[in-house]
Image (spheres, grey):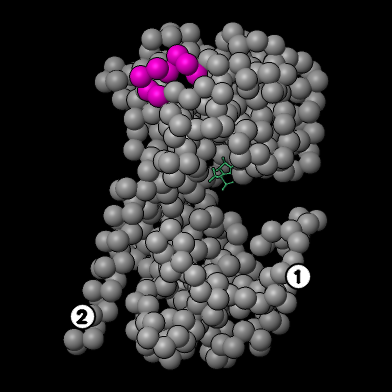
Amino acid sequence: MAGRHAGLDLIVIEAEHLYSRPGNPYVGPDGWDWPDNWKRFAALSWVAAELGNGLIEGYRPQLIHCHDWQAGLTPAYIKFGPSVGVKTVMTIHNIAFKGFFGPDVFGQLRLPSHAFSVSGVEFHGGISYLKSGMECADFVTTVSPNYASEICTPEFGMGLEGLLNGRSDTVTGILNGIDTVAWDPAIDKALVQPFSANNIQKRHLNKQEVAKKFELDGIDGPLFCVISRLTDQKGMDLLLEALDGLVALGGRLAVLGSGDEALEHGFRNARTRHPGKVGLITGYNEQLSHLIQGGADAILIPSRFEPCGLTQLYGLRYGCVPVVSRIGGLADTIIDANPAALEAGVATGILFSANNTHALYEAIRKAVRLYRDEKSWKKMQRRGMKSEVSWHNSARRYVDLYTSLIGIQLNDDID
Ligand code: ADP
């Protein structure tokens, strides 16, 4: 099926027997992966490669950009298929999700037998779709420069660091941007009071609304928030450990999220322990996430790893100061309020060592201290609101990458 949306031509694959199901594209309503995900995403990857190979008369793409393991077989189908010169880029959004399946499915993937090898789809005796893409694509990108370096180390590479190191001249990190129209505090309908960097004091009406929704007792003192999957990756267990300290410092906390049952339980307990100081709303609520960003004073992101992270970018844009671990894209996008940065007037948030409850607590303490200096806090908020968080620079980098790859192709042709 073909159509046009937002100025783009779209091709949609219709395969009801694979995709027409309840739940979301990845998991069933019970939250578990579909058992035939290997086939569902092999089909997606196969069709993409077929399009690259000229399936539609008159349509010859020069480059296929594949995202995450679900599209990871496409570069393998291109590499082991007919040689038509189409280039492939593989982008890793989270190396933890490898799309790993047993060797038994190989026979049904329509790949030649020699593709089941180290230079193909094989990974630890089975098949990893992500590894396939990383191995076979012409170029590998990930979503921040810092994460691109981190995944070349055993600590973050999750077994794929060797592959990345072996092709380091064709691996790079390009930051994600955000939709600055959907996320514009001056016109955002999810806010009770829109605002801009010039009238940041108006945020307090949103803060009042957040406090009301989370049943917090007033808005004196700093209001911290979390908008996140509740998982260990996001460091939510560390936050639970630091939470009593946050409250003792005079802070309040609004948590919007869902995920691990044990962590949800932990936040429910904290709410009972600290009525009026800690609020929890479970589930996924996009509108509410806008209101929180527009009302809370600071957003806590204590991730253990974070390929890019979006919530700190929304936080910057909405004057909700990011307090984040010094990791992945968080470290690439936030300027820590250290003495030099404060002196130079460039700080946009607070950074602390990842995977360290004490460091998280100290960062919260620092945020509380800075918050009490109203003038410099507002300055930090304004600077964040003026940070470049759009796709502008990153889109340019993707265009440069595409043209250099297609250029290489032209040179190859000339040779
Ligand atoms: P990840 O993709 O690892 O979950 P990111 O920070 O890159 O983390 O992106 C998370 C996105 O999901 C953000 O847009 C954030 O606002 C949104 N989000 C996470 N949890 C919720 C929730 N409970 N309700 C609404 N939005 C949420």
Q: Is residue 261 visible?
A: yes
Q: In the image, residue 50 lies at what x, y percent?
A: 49, 84
- Which range is magenta? 196-203
Q: Which residue in the structure is indicated by mark 1?
A: 35
Three-letter amino acid code of the residue under disc 1: Pro
* Residue at position x 56%, y 87% in the image: 111
Q: In the image, residue 349 lies at what x, y percent?
A: 43, 26
Three-letter amino acid code of the residue under disc 2: Asn
- 341 vs 214, nearest the viewer: 214
- Of mark 2 and mark 1, the one earlier in the sequence is 1
* Residue at position x 69%, y 23% in the image: 213
Q: The residue tagged with tag 1: helix, strand or loop?
A: loop
Q: Give me the disc on residue 393.
A: none
**Badge 2 vs badge 1, beta-carbon distance below 8 Å:** no
Q: Is residue 164 visible?
A: no
* Residue at position x 53%, y 15% in the image: 204
Q: Which residue in the structure is indicated by mark 2?
A: 411
- 103 vs 330, nearest the viewer: 330
Check residue 197 for magenta coloring.
Answer: yes
In the rendered structure, the answer to whether residue 136 lies left or right of residue 212 reads left
**Number of residues whose C-alpha sits closer than 10 Å to that of mark 2, classed few (under 14), some (14–19) or many (20 or more):** few
- 89 vs 121, nearest the viewer: 89
User: Does residue 93 sit above or below 232 in this rendering?
Assistant: below
